[in-house]
Image (spheres, grey):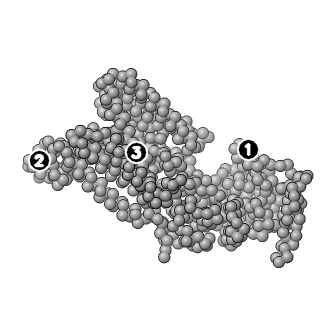
Amino acid sequence: MRVDIDGLSAHRGGRPVVTDVSIAVPSGSVLGLIGPNGSGKSTLLRAVSGIGRASSGRVRFDGVDAATLSRRDLARRVAVMAQEHSEEFEITVLDLVLLGRIPHGRGFGRDSEHDISLAEAALDRVGARRLAGRRFAALSGGERQRVLLARALTQDTPVLILDEPTNHLDIAHQLELLELVTTTERTVLVALHDLNLAARSCDAVAVLADGRLVALGEPDDVLDTTAIRTVFGVDSTAVRHPATGRRHLIFDARSPHPVSKGTPVR
Amino acid sequence: MPLQPSGVLAARVLVPALTAALAVLLLLSAAVGTISVSAADAVRLVVGHLLPGMPWMTDGSYTALQDNAVWQFRLPRALLAAITGAALALAGALMQVVVHNPLAEPYILGVSAGAGVGAVSLIVFGVGASSLAIGSAAFLGALLATAAVYLLSQRHGRIAPQRLILAGVALGSLFSAVTSYLTITTDAQNVFSIMFLLLGSVSAATMTHLALPAAALLGVLAFTAFRARALNALLAGDDAATSLGVNVNRLRSSVLIAAALLTGSVVAVSGGIGFVGLVIPHVARIVVGTDHRRTLPVATLGGAVFLTGADLLARTVAAPTEIPLGVLTALVGAPFFLWLLRRDRADSVGMSR
């Protein structure tokens, strides 16, 4: 499913955080959002997924304006892999993954065999089937991320949104999770901190700074040493990976003369 | 082997078992008392009132005293206990999930404190107030308190759970202070009826008293049946629920109003009976898990069984003296709950944090 973000602006806490961002994400492609802390990545993703509200502009899914969709219809198109989970009440992994079926069912309706088989498939896919009967709170950070991804997959939507899904993960799990995400055939919007990881996993990269889109394109066209200095205020060296031949960035030091003004860390 | 959500089997056994237990307890309550009526006779009397033309109602098998004891006193009382228990447990389970707080209970919105002010004002200022008038005043007080808390905790059209709890607690203390002041300054003869009301009791029940709480209970049950899955989504947090297609603010508001109406309708008749609304939902979660499609029916039935049983004990263990119901629920329920808390199963629903 194609996602068109069109002149989107959004406020958070009364402050403009995202200003006039337009991005077209072709069906089945992976868009990486990068930018410093506070650049508006999360707010943009919240607005696209309908969790947050846009103050102007619009988002279209295959041409359908998201504002015309009910919450439920939106949830059948877009799944969000959350960063956090509320923990007042305990829940087992399988029950948590089955929450992904909520937009597809009603009321007291029992989980159908179809629901359960989708949940099983998602758990298999993230390699967490053996965790099904465990309590979510008792899982390690890496296991939690995988289970939350399984819930998003169980929602069975054409669009998947992930906000820094590799937080708290070791390098093996980071690679594994991004591998999973990029092989789902869904349209994926993912905010990432690791620029090299973004470069190797995404079809296109959008760079945000101070809530504005400053660059958009294929990773190798966008992620060069000039952009890194401009946006992050960090000097870097680009090298060629000896095995894959891809460009790899090595970060040297904070740039003495950052070009963009610094944004406060949230 | 295909996976199965936890607690499904337990719920499948518990729902019929609790229903049967409730039927037995209601029957026992109708039969037990100073005027002797056997369980079978109690059934015949109840059937005779429900279906016209039963021969034993007119052929002198039963004395008017027996008939009255079963139909006018014991059955309404047992039914009110069941409805009250069910309503408080359901309201408690709903409150806990919509405000994201396991310590929430039906009275958190200042509902019982508001009802207390309403009823006590009528006793203190009213002349020859009937129990129905006191009930209406209590219901009115409960509604006013709920409306006040609801309005105070709303900002920019959104209800923040934390603010709601704090506003409820603050307003509750305010109302309690008013009640205390009225109680201490009124004539001594009023104090007994006030204490009776505040402690909670189902002993004055008649069939007419049952109408409002029963209607409220059925209405809220039907209402929540279609929102059980959306309530499950709330378990994952507001943002996650939104991304799962739930309109969180509308769900929270409507469930809060439903729970408050339910609590108000019960408090108006039975007074403030504590413990049930806080603890029964936790017991249900420990046994069948946090999925509301199982928690809500089990908590509702469990609350009914618990309070019917407690009321039966309250009027029999020390007969002819009656133990106040609120005292008995805590005496029986607290040790049981503390035992349950220490079991491993409790850890699995987050009781060890």
Identify residue type, mark 1.
Arg
Which sits in the foreground, B202 or B152?
Answer: B202
Q: Residue at x 84, y 64 (%)?
A: A223
Q: Nearer the viewer, residue B61 or B10?
A: B10
Q: Chain of mark 1?
A: A
Position in image of residue B339 (x %, y %): 40, 54
Please state if A90 lies on the left or on the right of B59 as rendered.
right
Residue B62's mark? 2
Name which residue lies at 49% across and 54% down. B351
Tell me which label, 3 or 2, sits earlier in the chain: 2
- Check if mark 2's residue and mark 1's residue have beta carbons within 8 Å: no
Q: Secondary structure at mark 3?
A: loop
CA–CA distance in space, label 1 to label 3: 45 Å
Q: What residue is disc 3 on?
A: B275
Q: Name the element at disc 2.
A: loop
Q: In this orientation, does residue B204 appear?
A: yes
Query: Quadrant of residue B67 in the image?
Result: top left
Between A87 and B341, the one nearer to me in the picture: B341
Where residue A199 sits in the image (x, y, percent)?
A: 79, 67
Q: CA distance from mark 2 to mark 1?
A: 78 Å
Disc 3 versus disc 2: nearer the observer: 3
- Look at discs 1 and 3 and give the one toward the viewer: 3
Residue position for label 1: A15
The reply to whether dot 1 and dot 3 touch (C-beta < 8 Å) is no
Measured Cα–Cα span from mark 3 to mark 2: 39 Å
Dividing the picture into quarters, in which one does residue A141 lie? bottom right
**Residue B260 image position (x, y, % from top left):** 45, 42
| Kind of residue at disc 2 | Tyr
Q: Residue at x 33, y 43 (%)?
A: B328
Residue A37, how many percent across, how many down? Answer: 76, 53
Place residue B22 in its image quadrant: bottom left
Circle 3 packing at 10 Å, graded few (<14), some (14-19), many (20+), is many
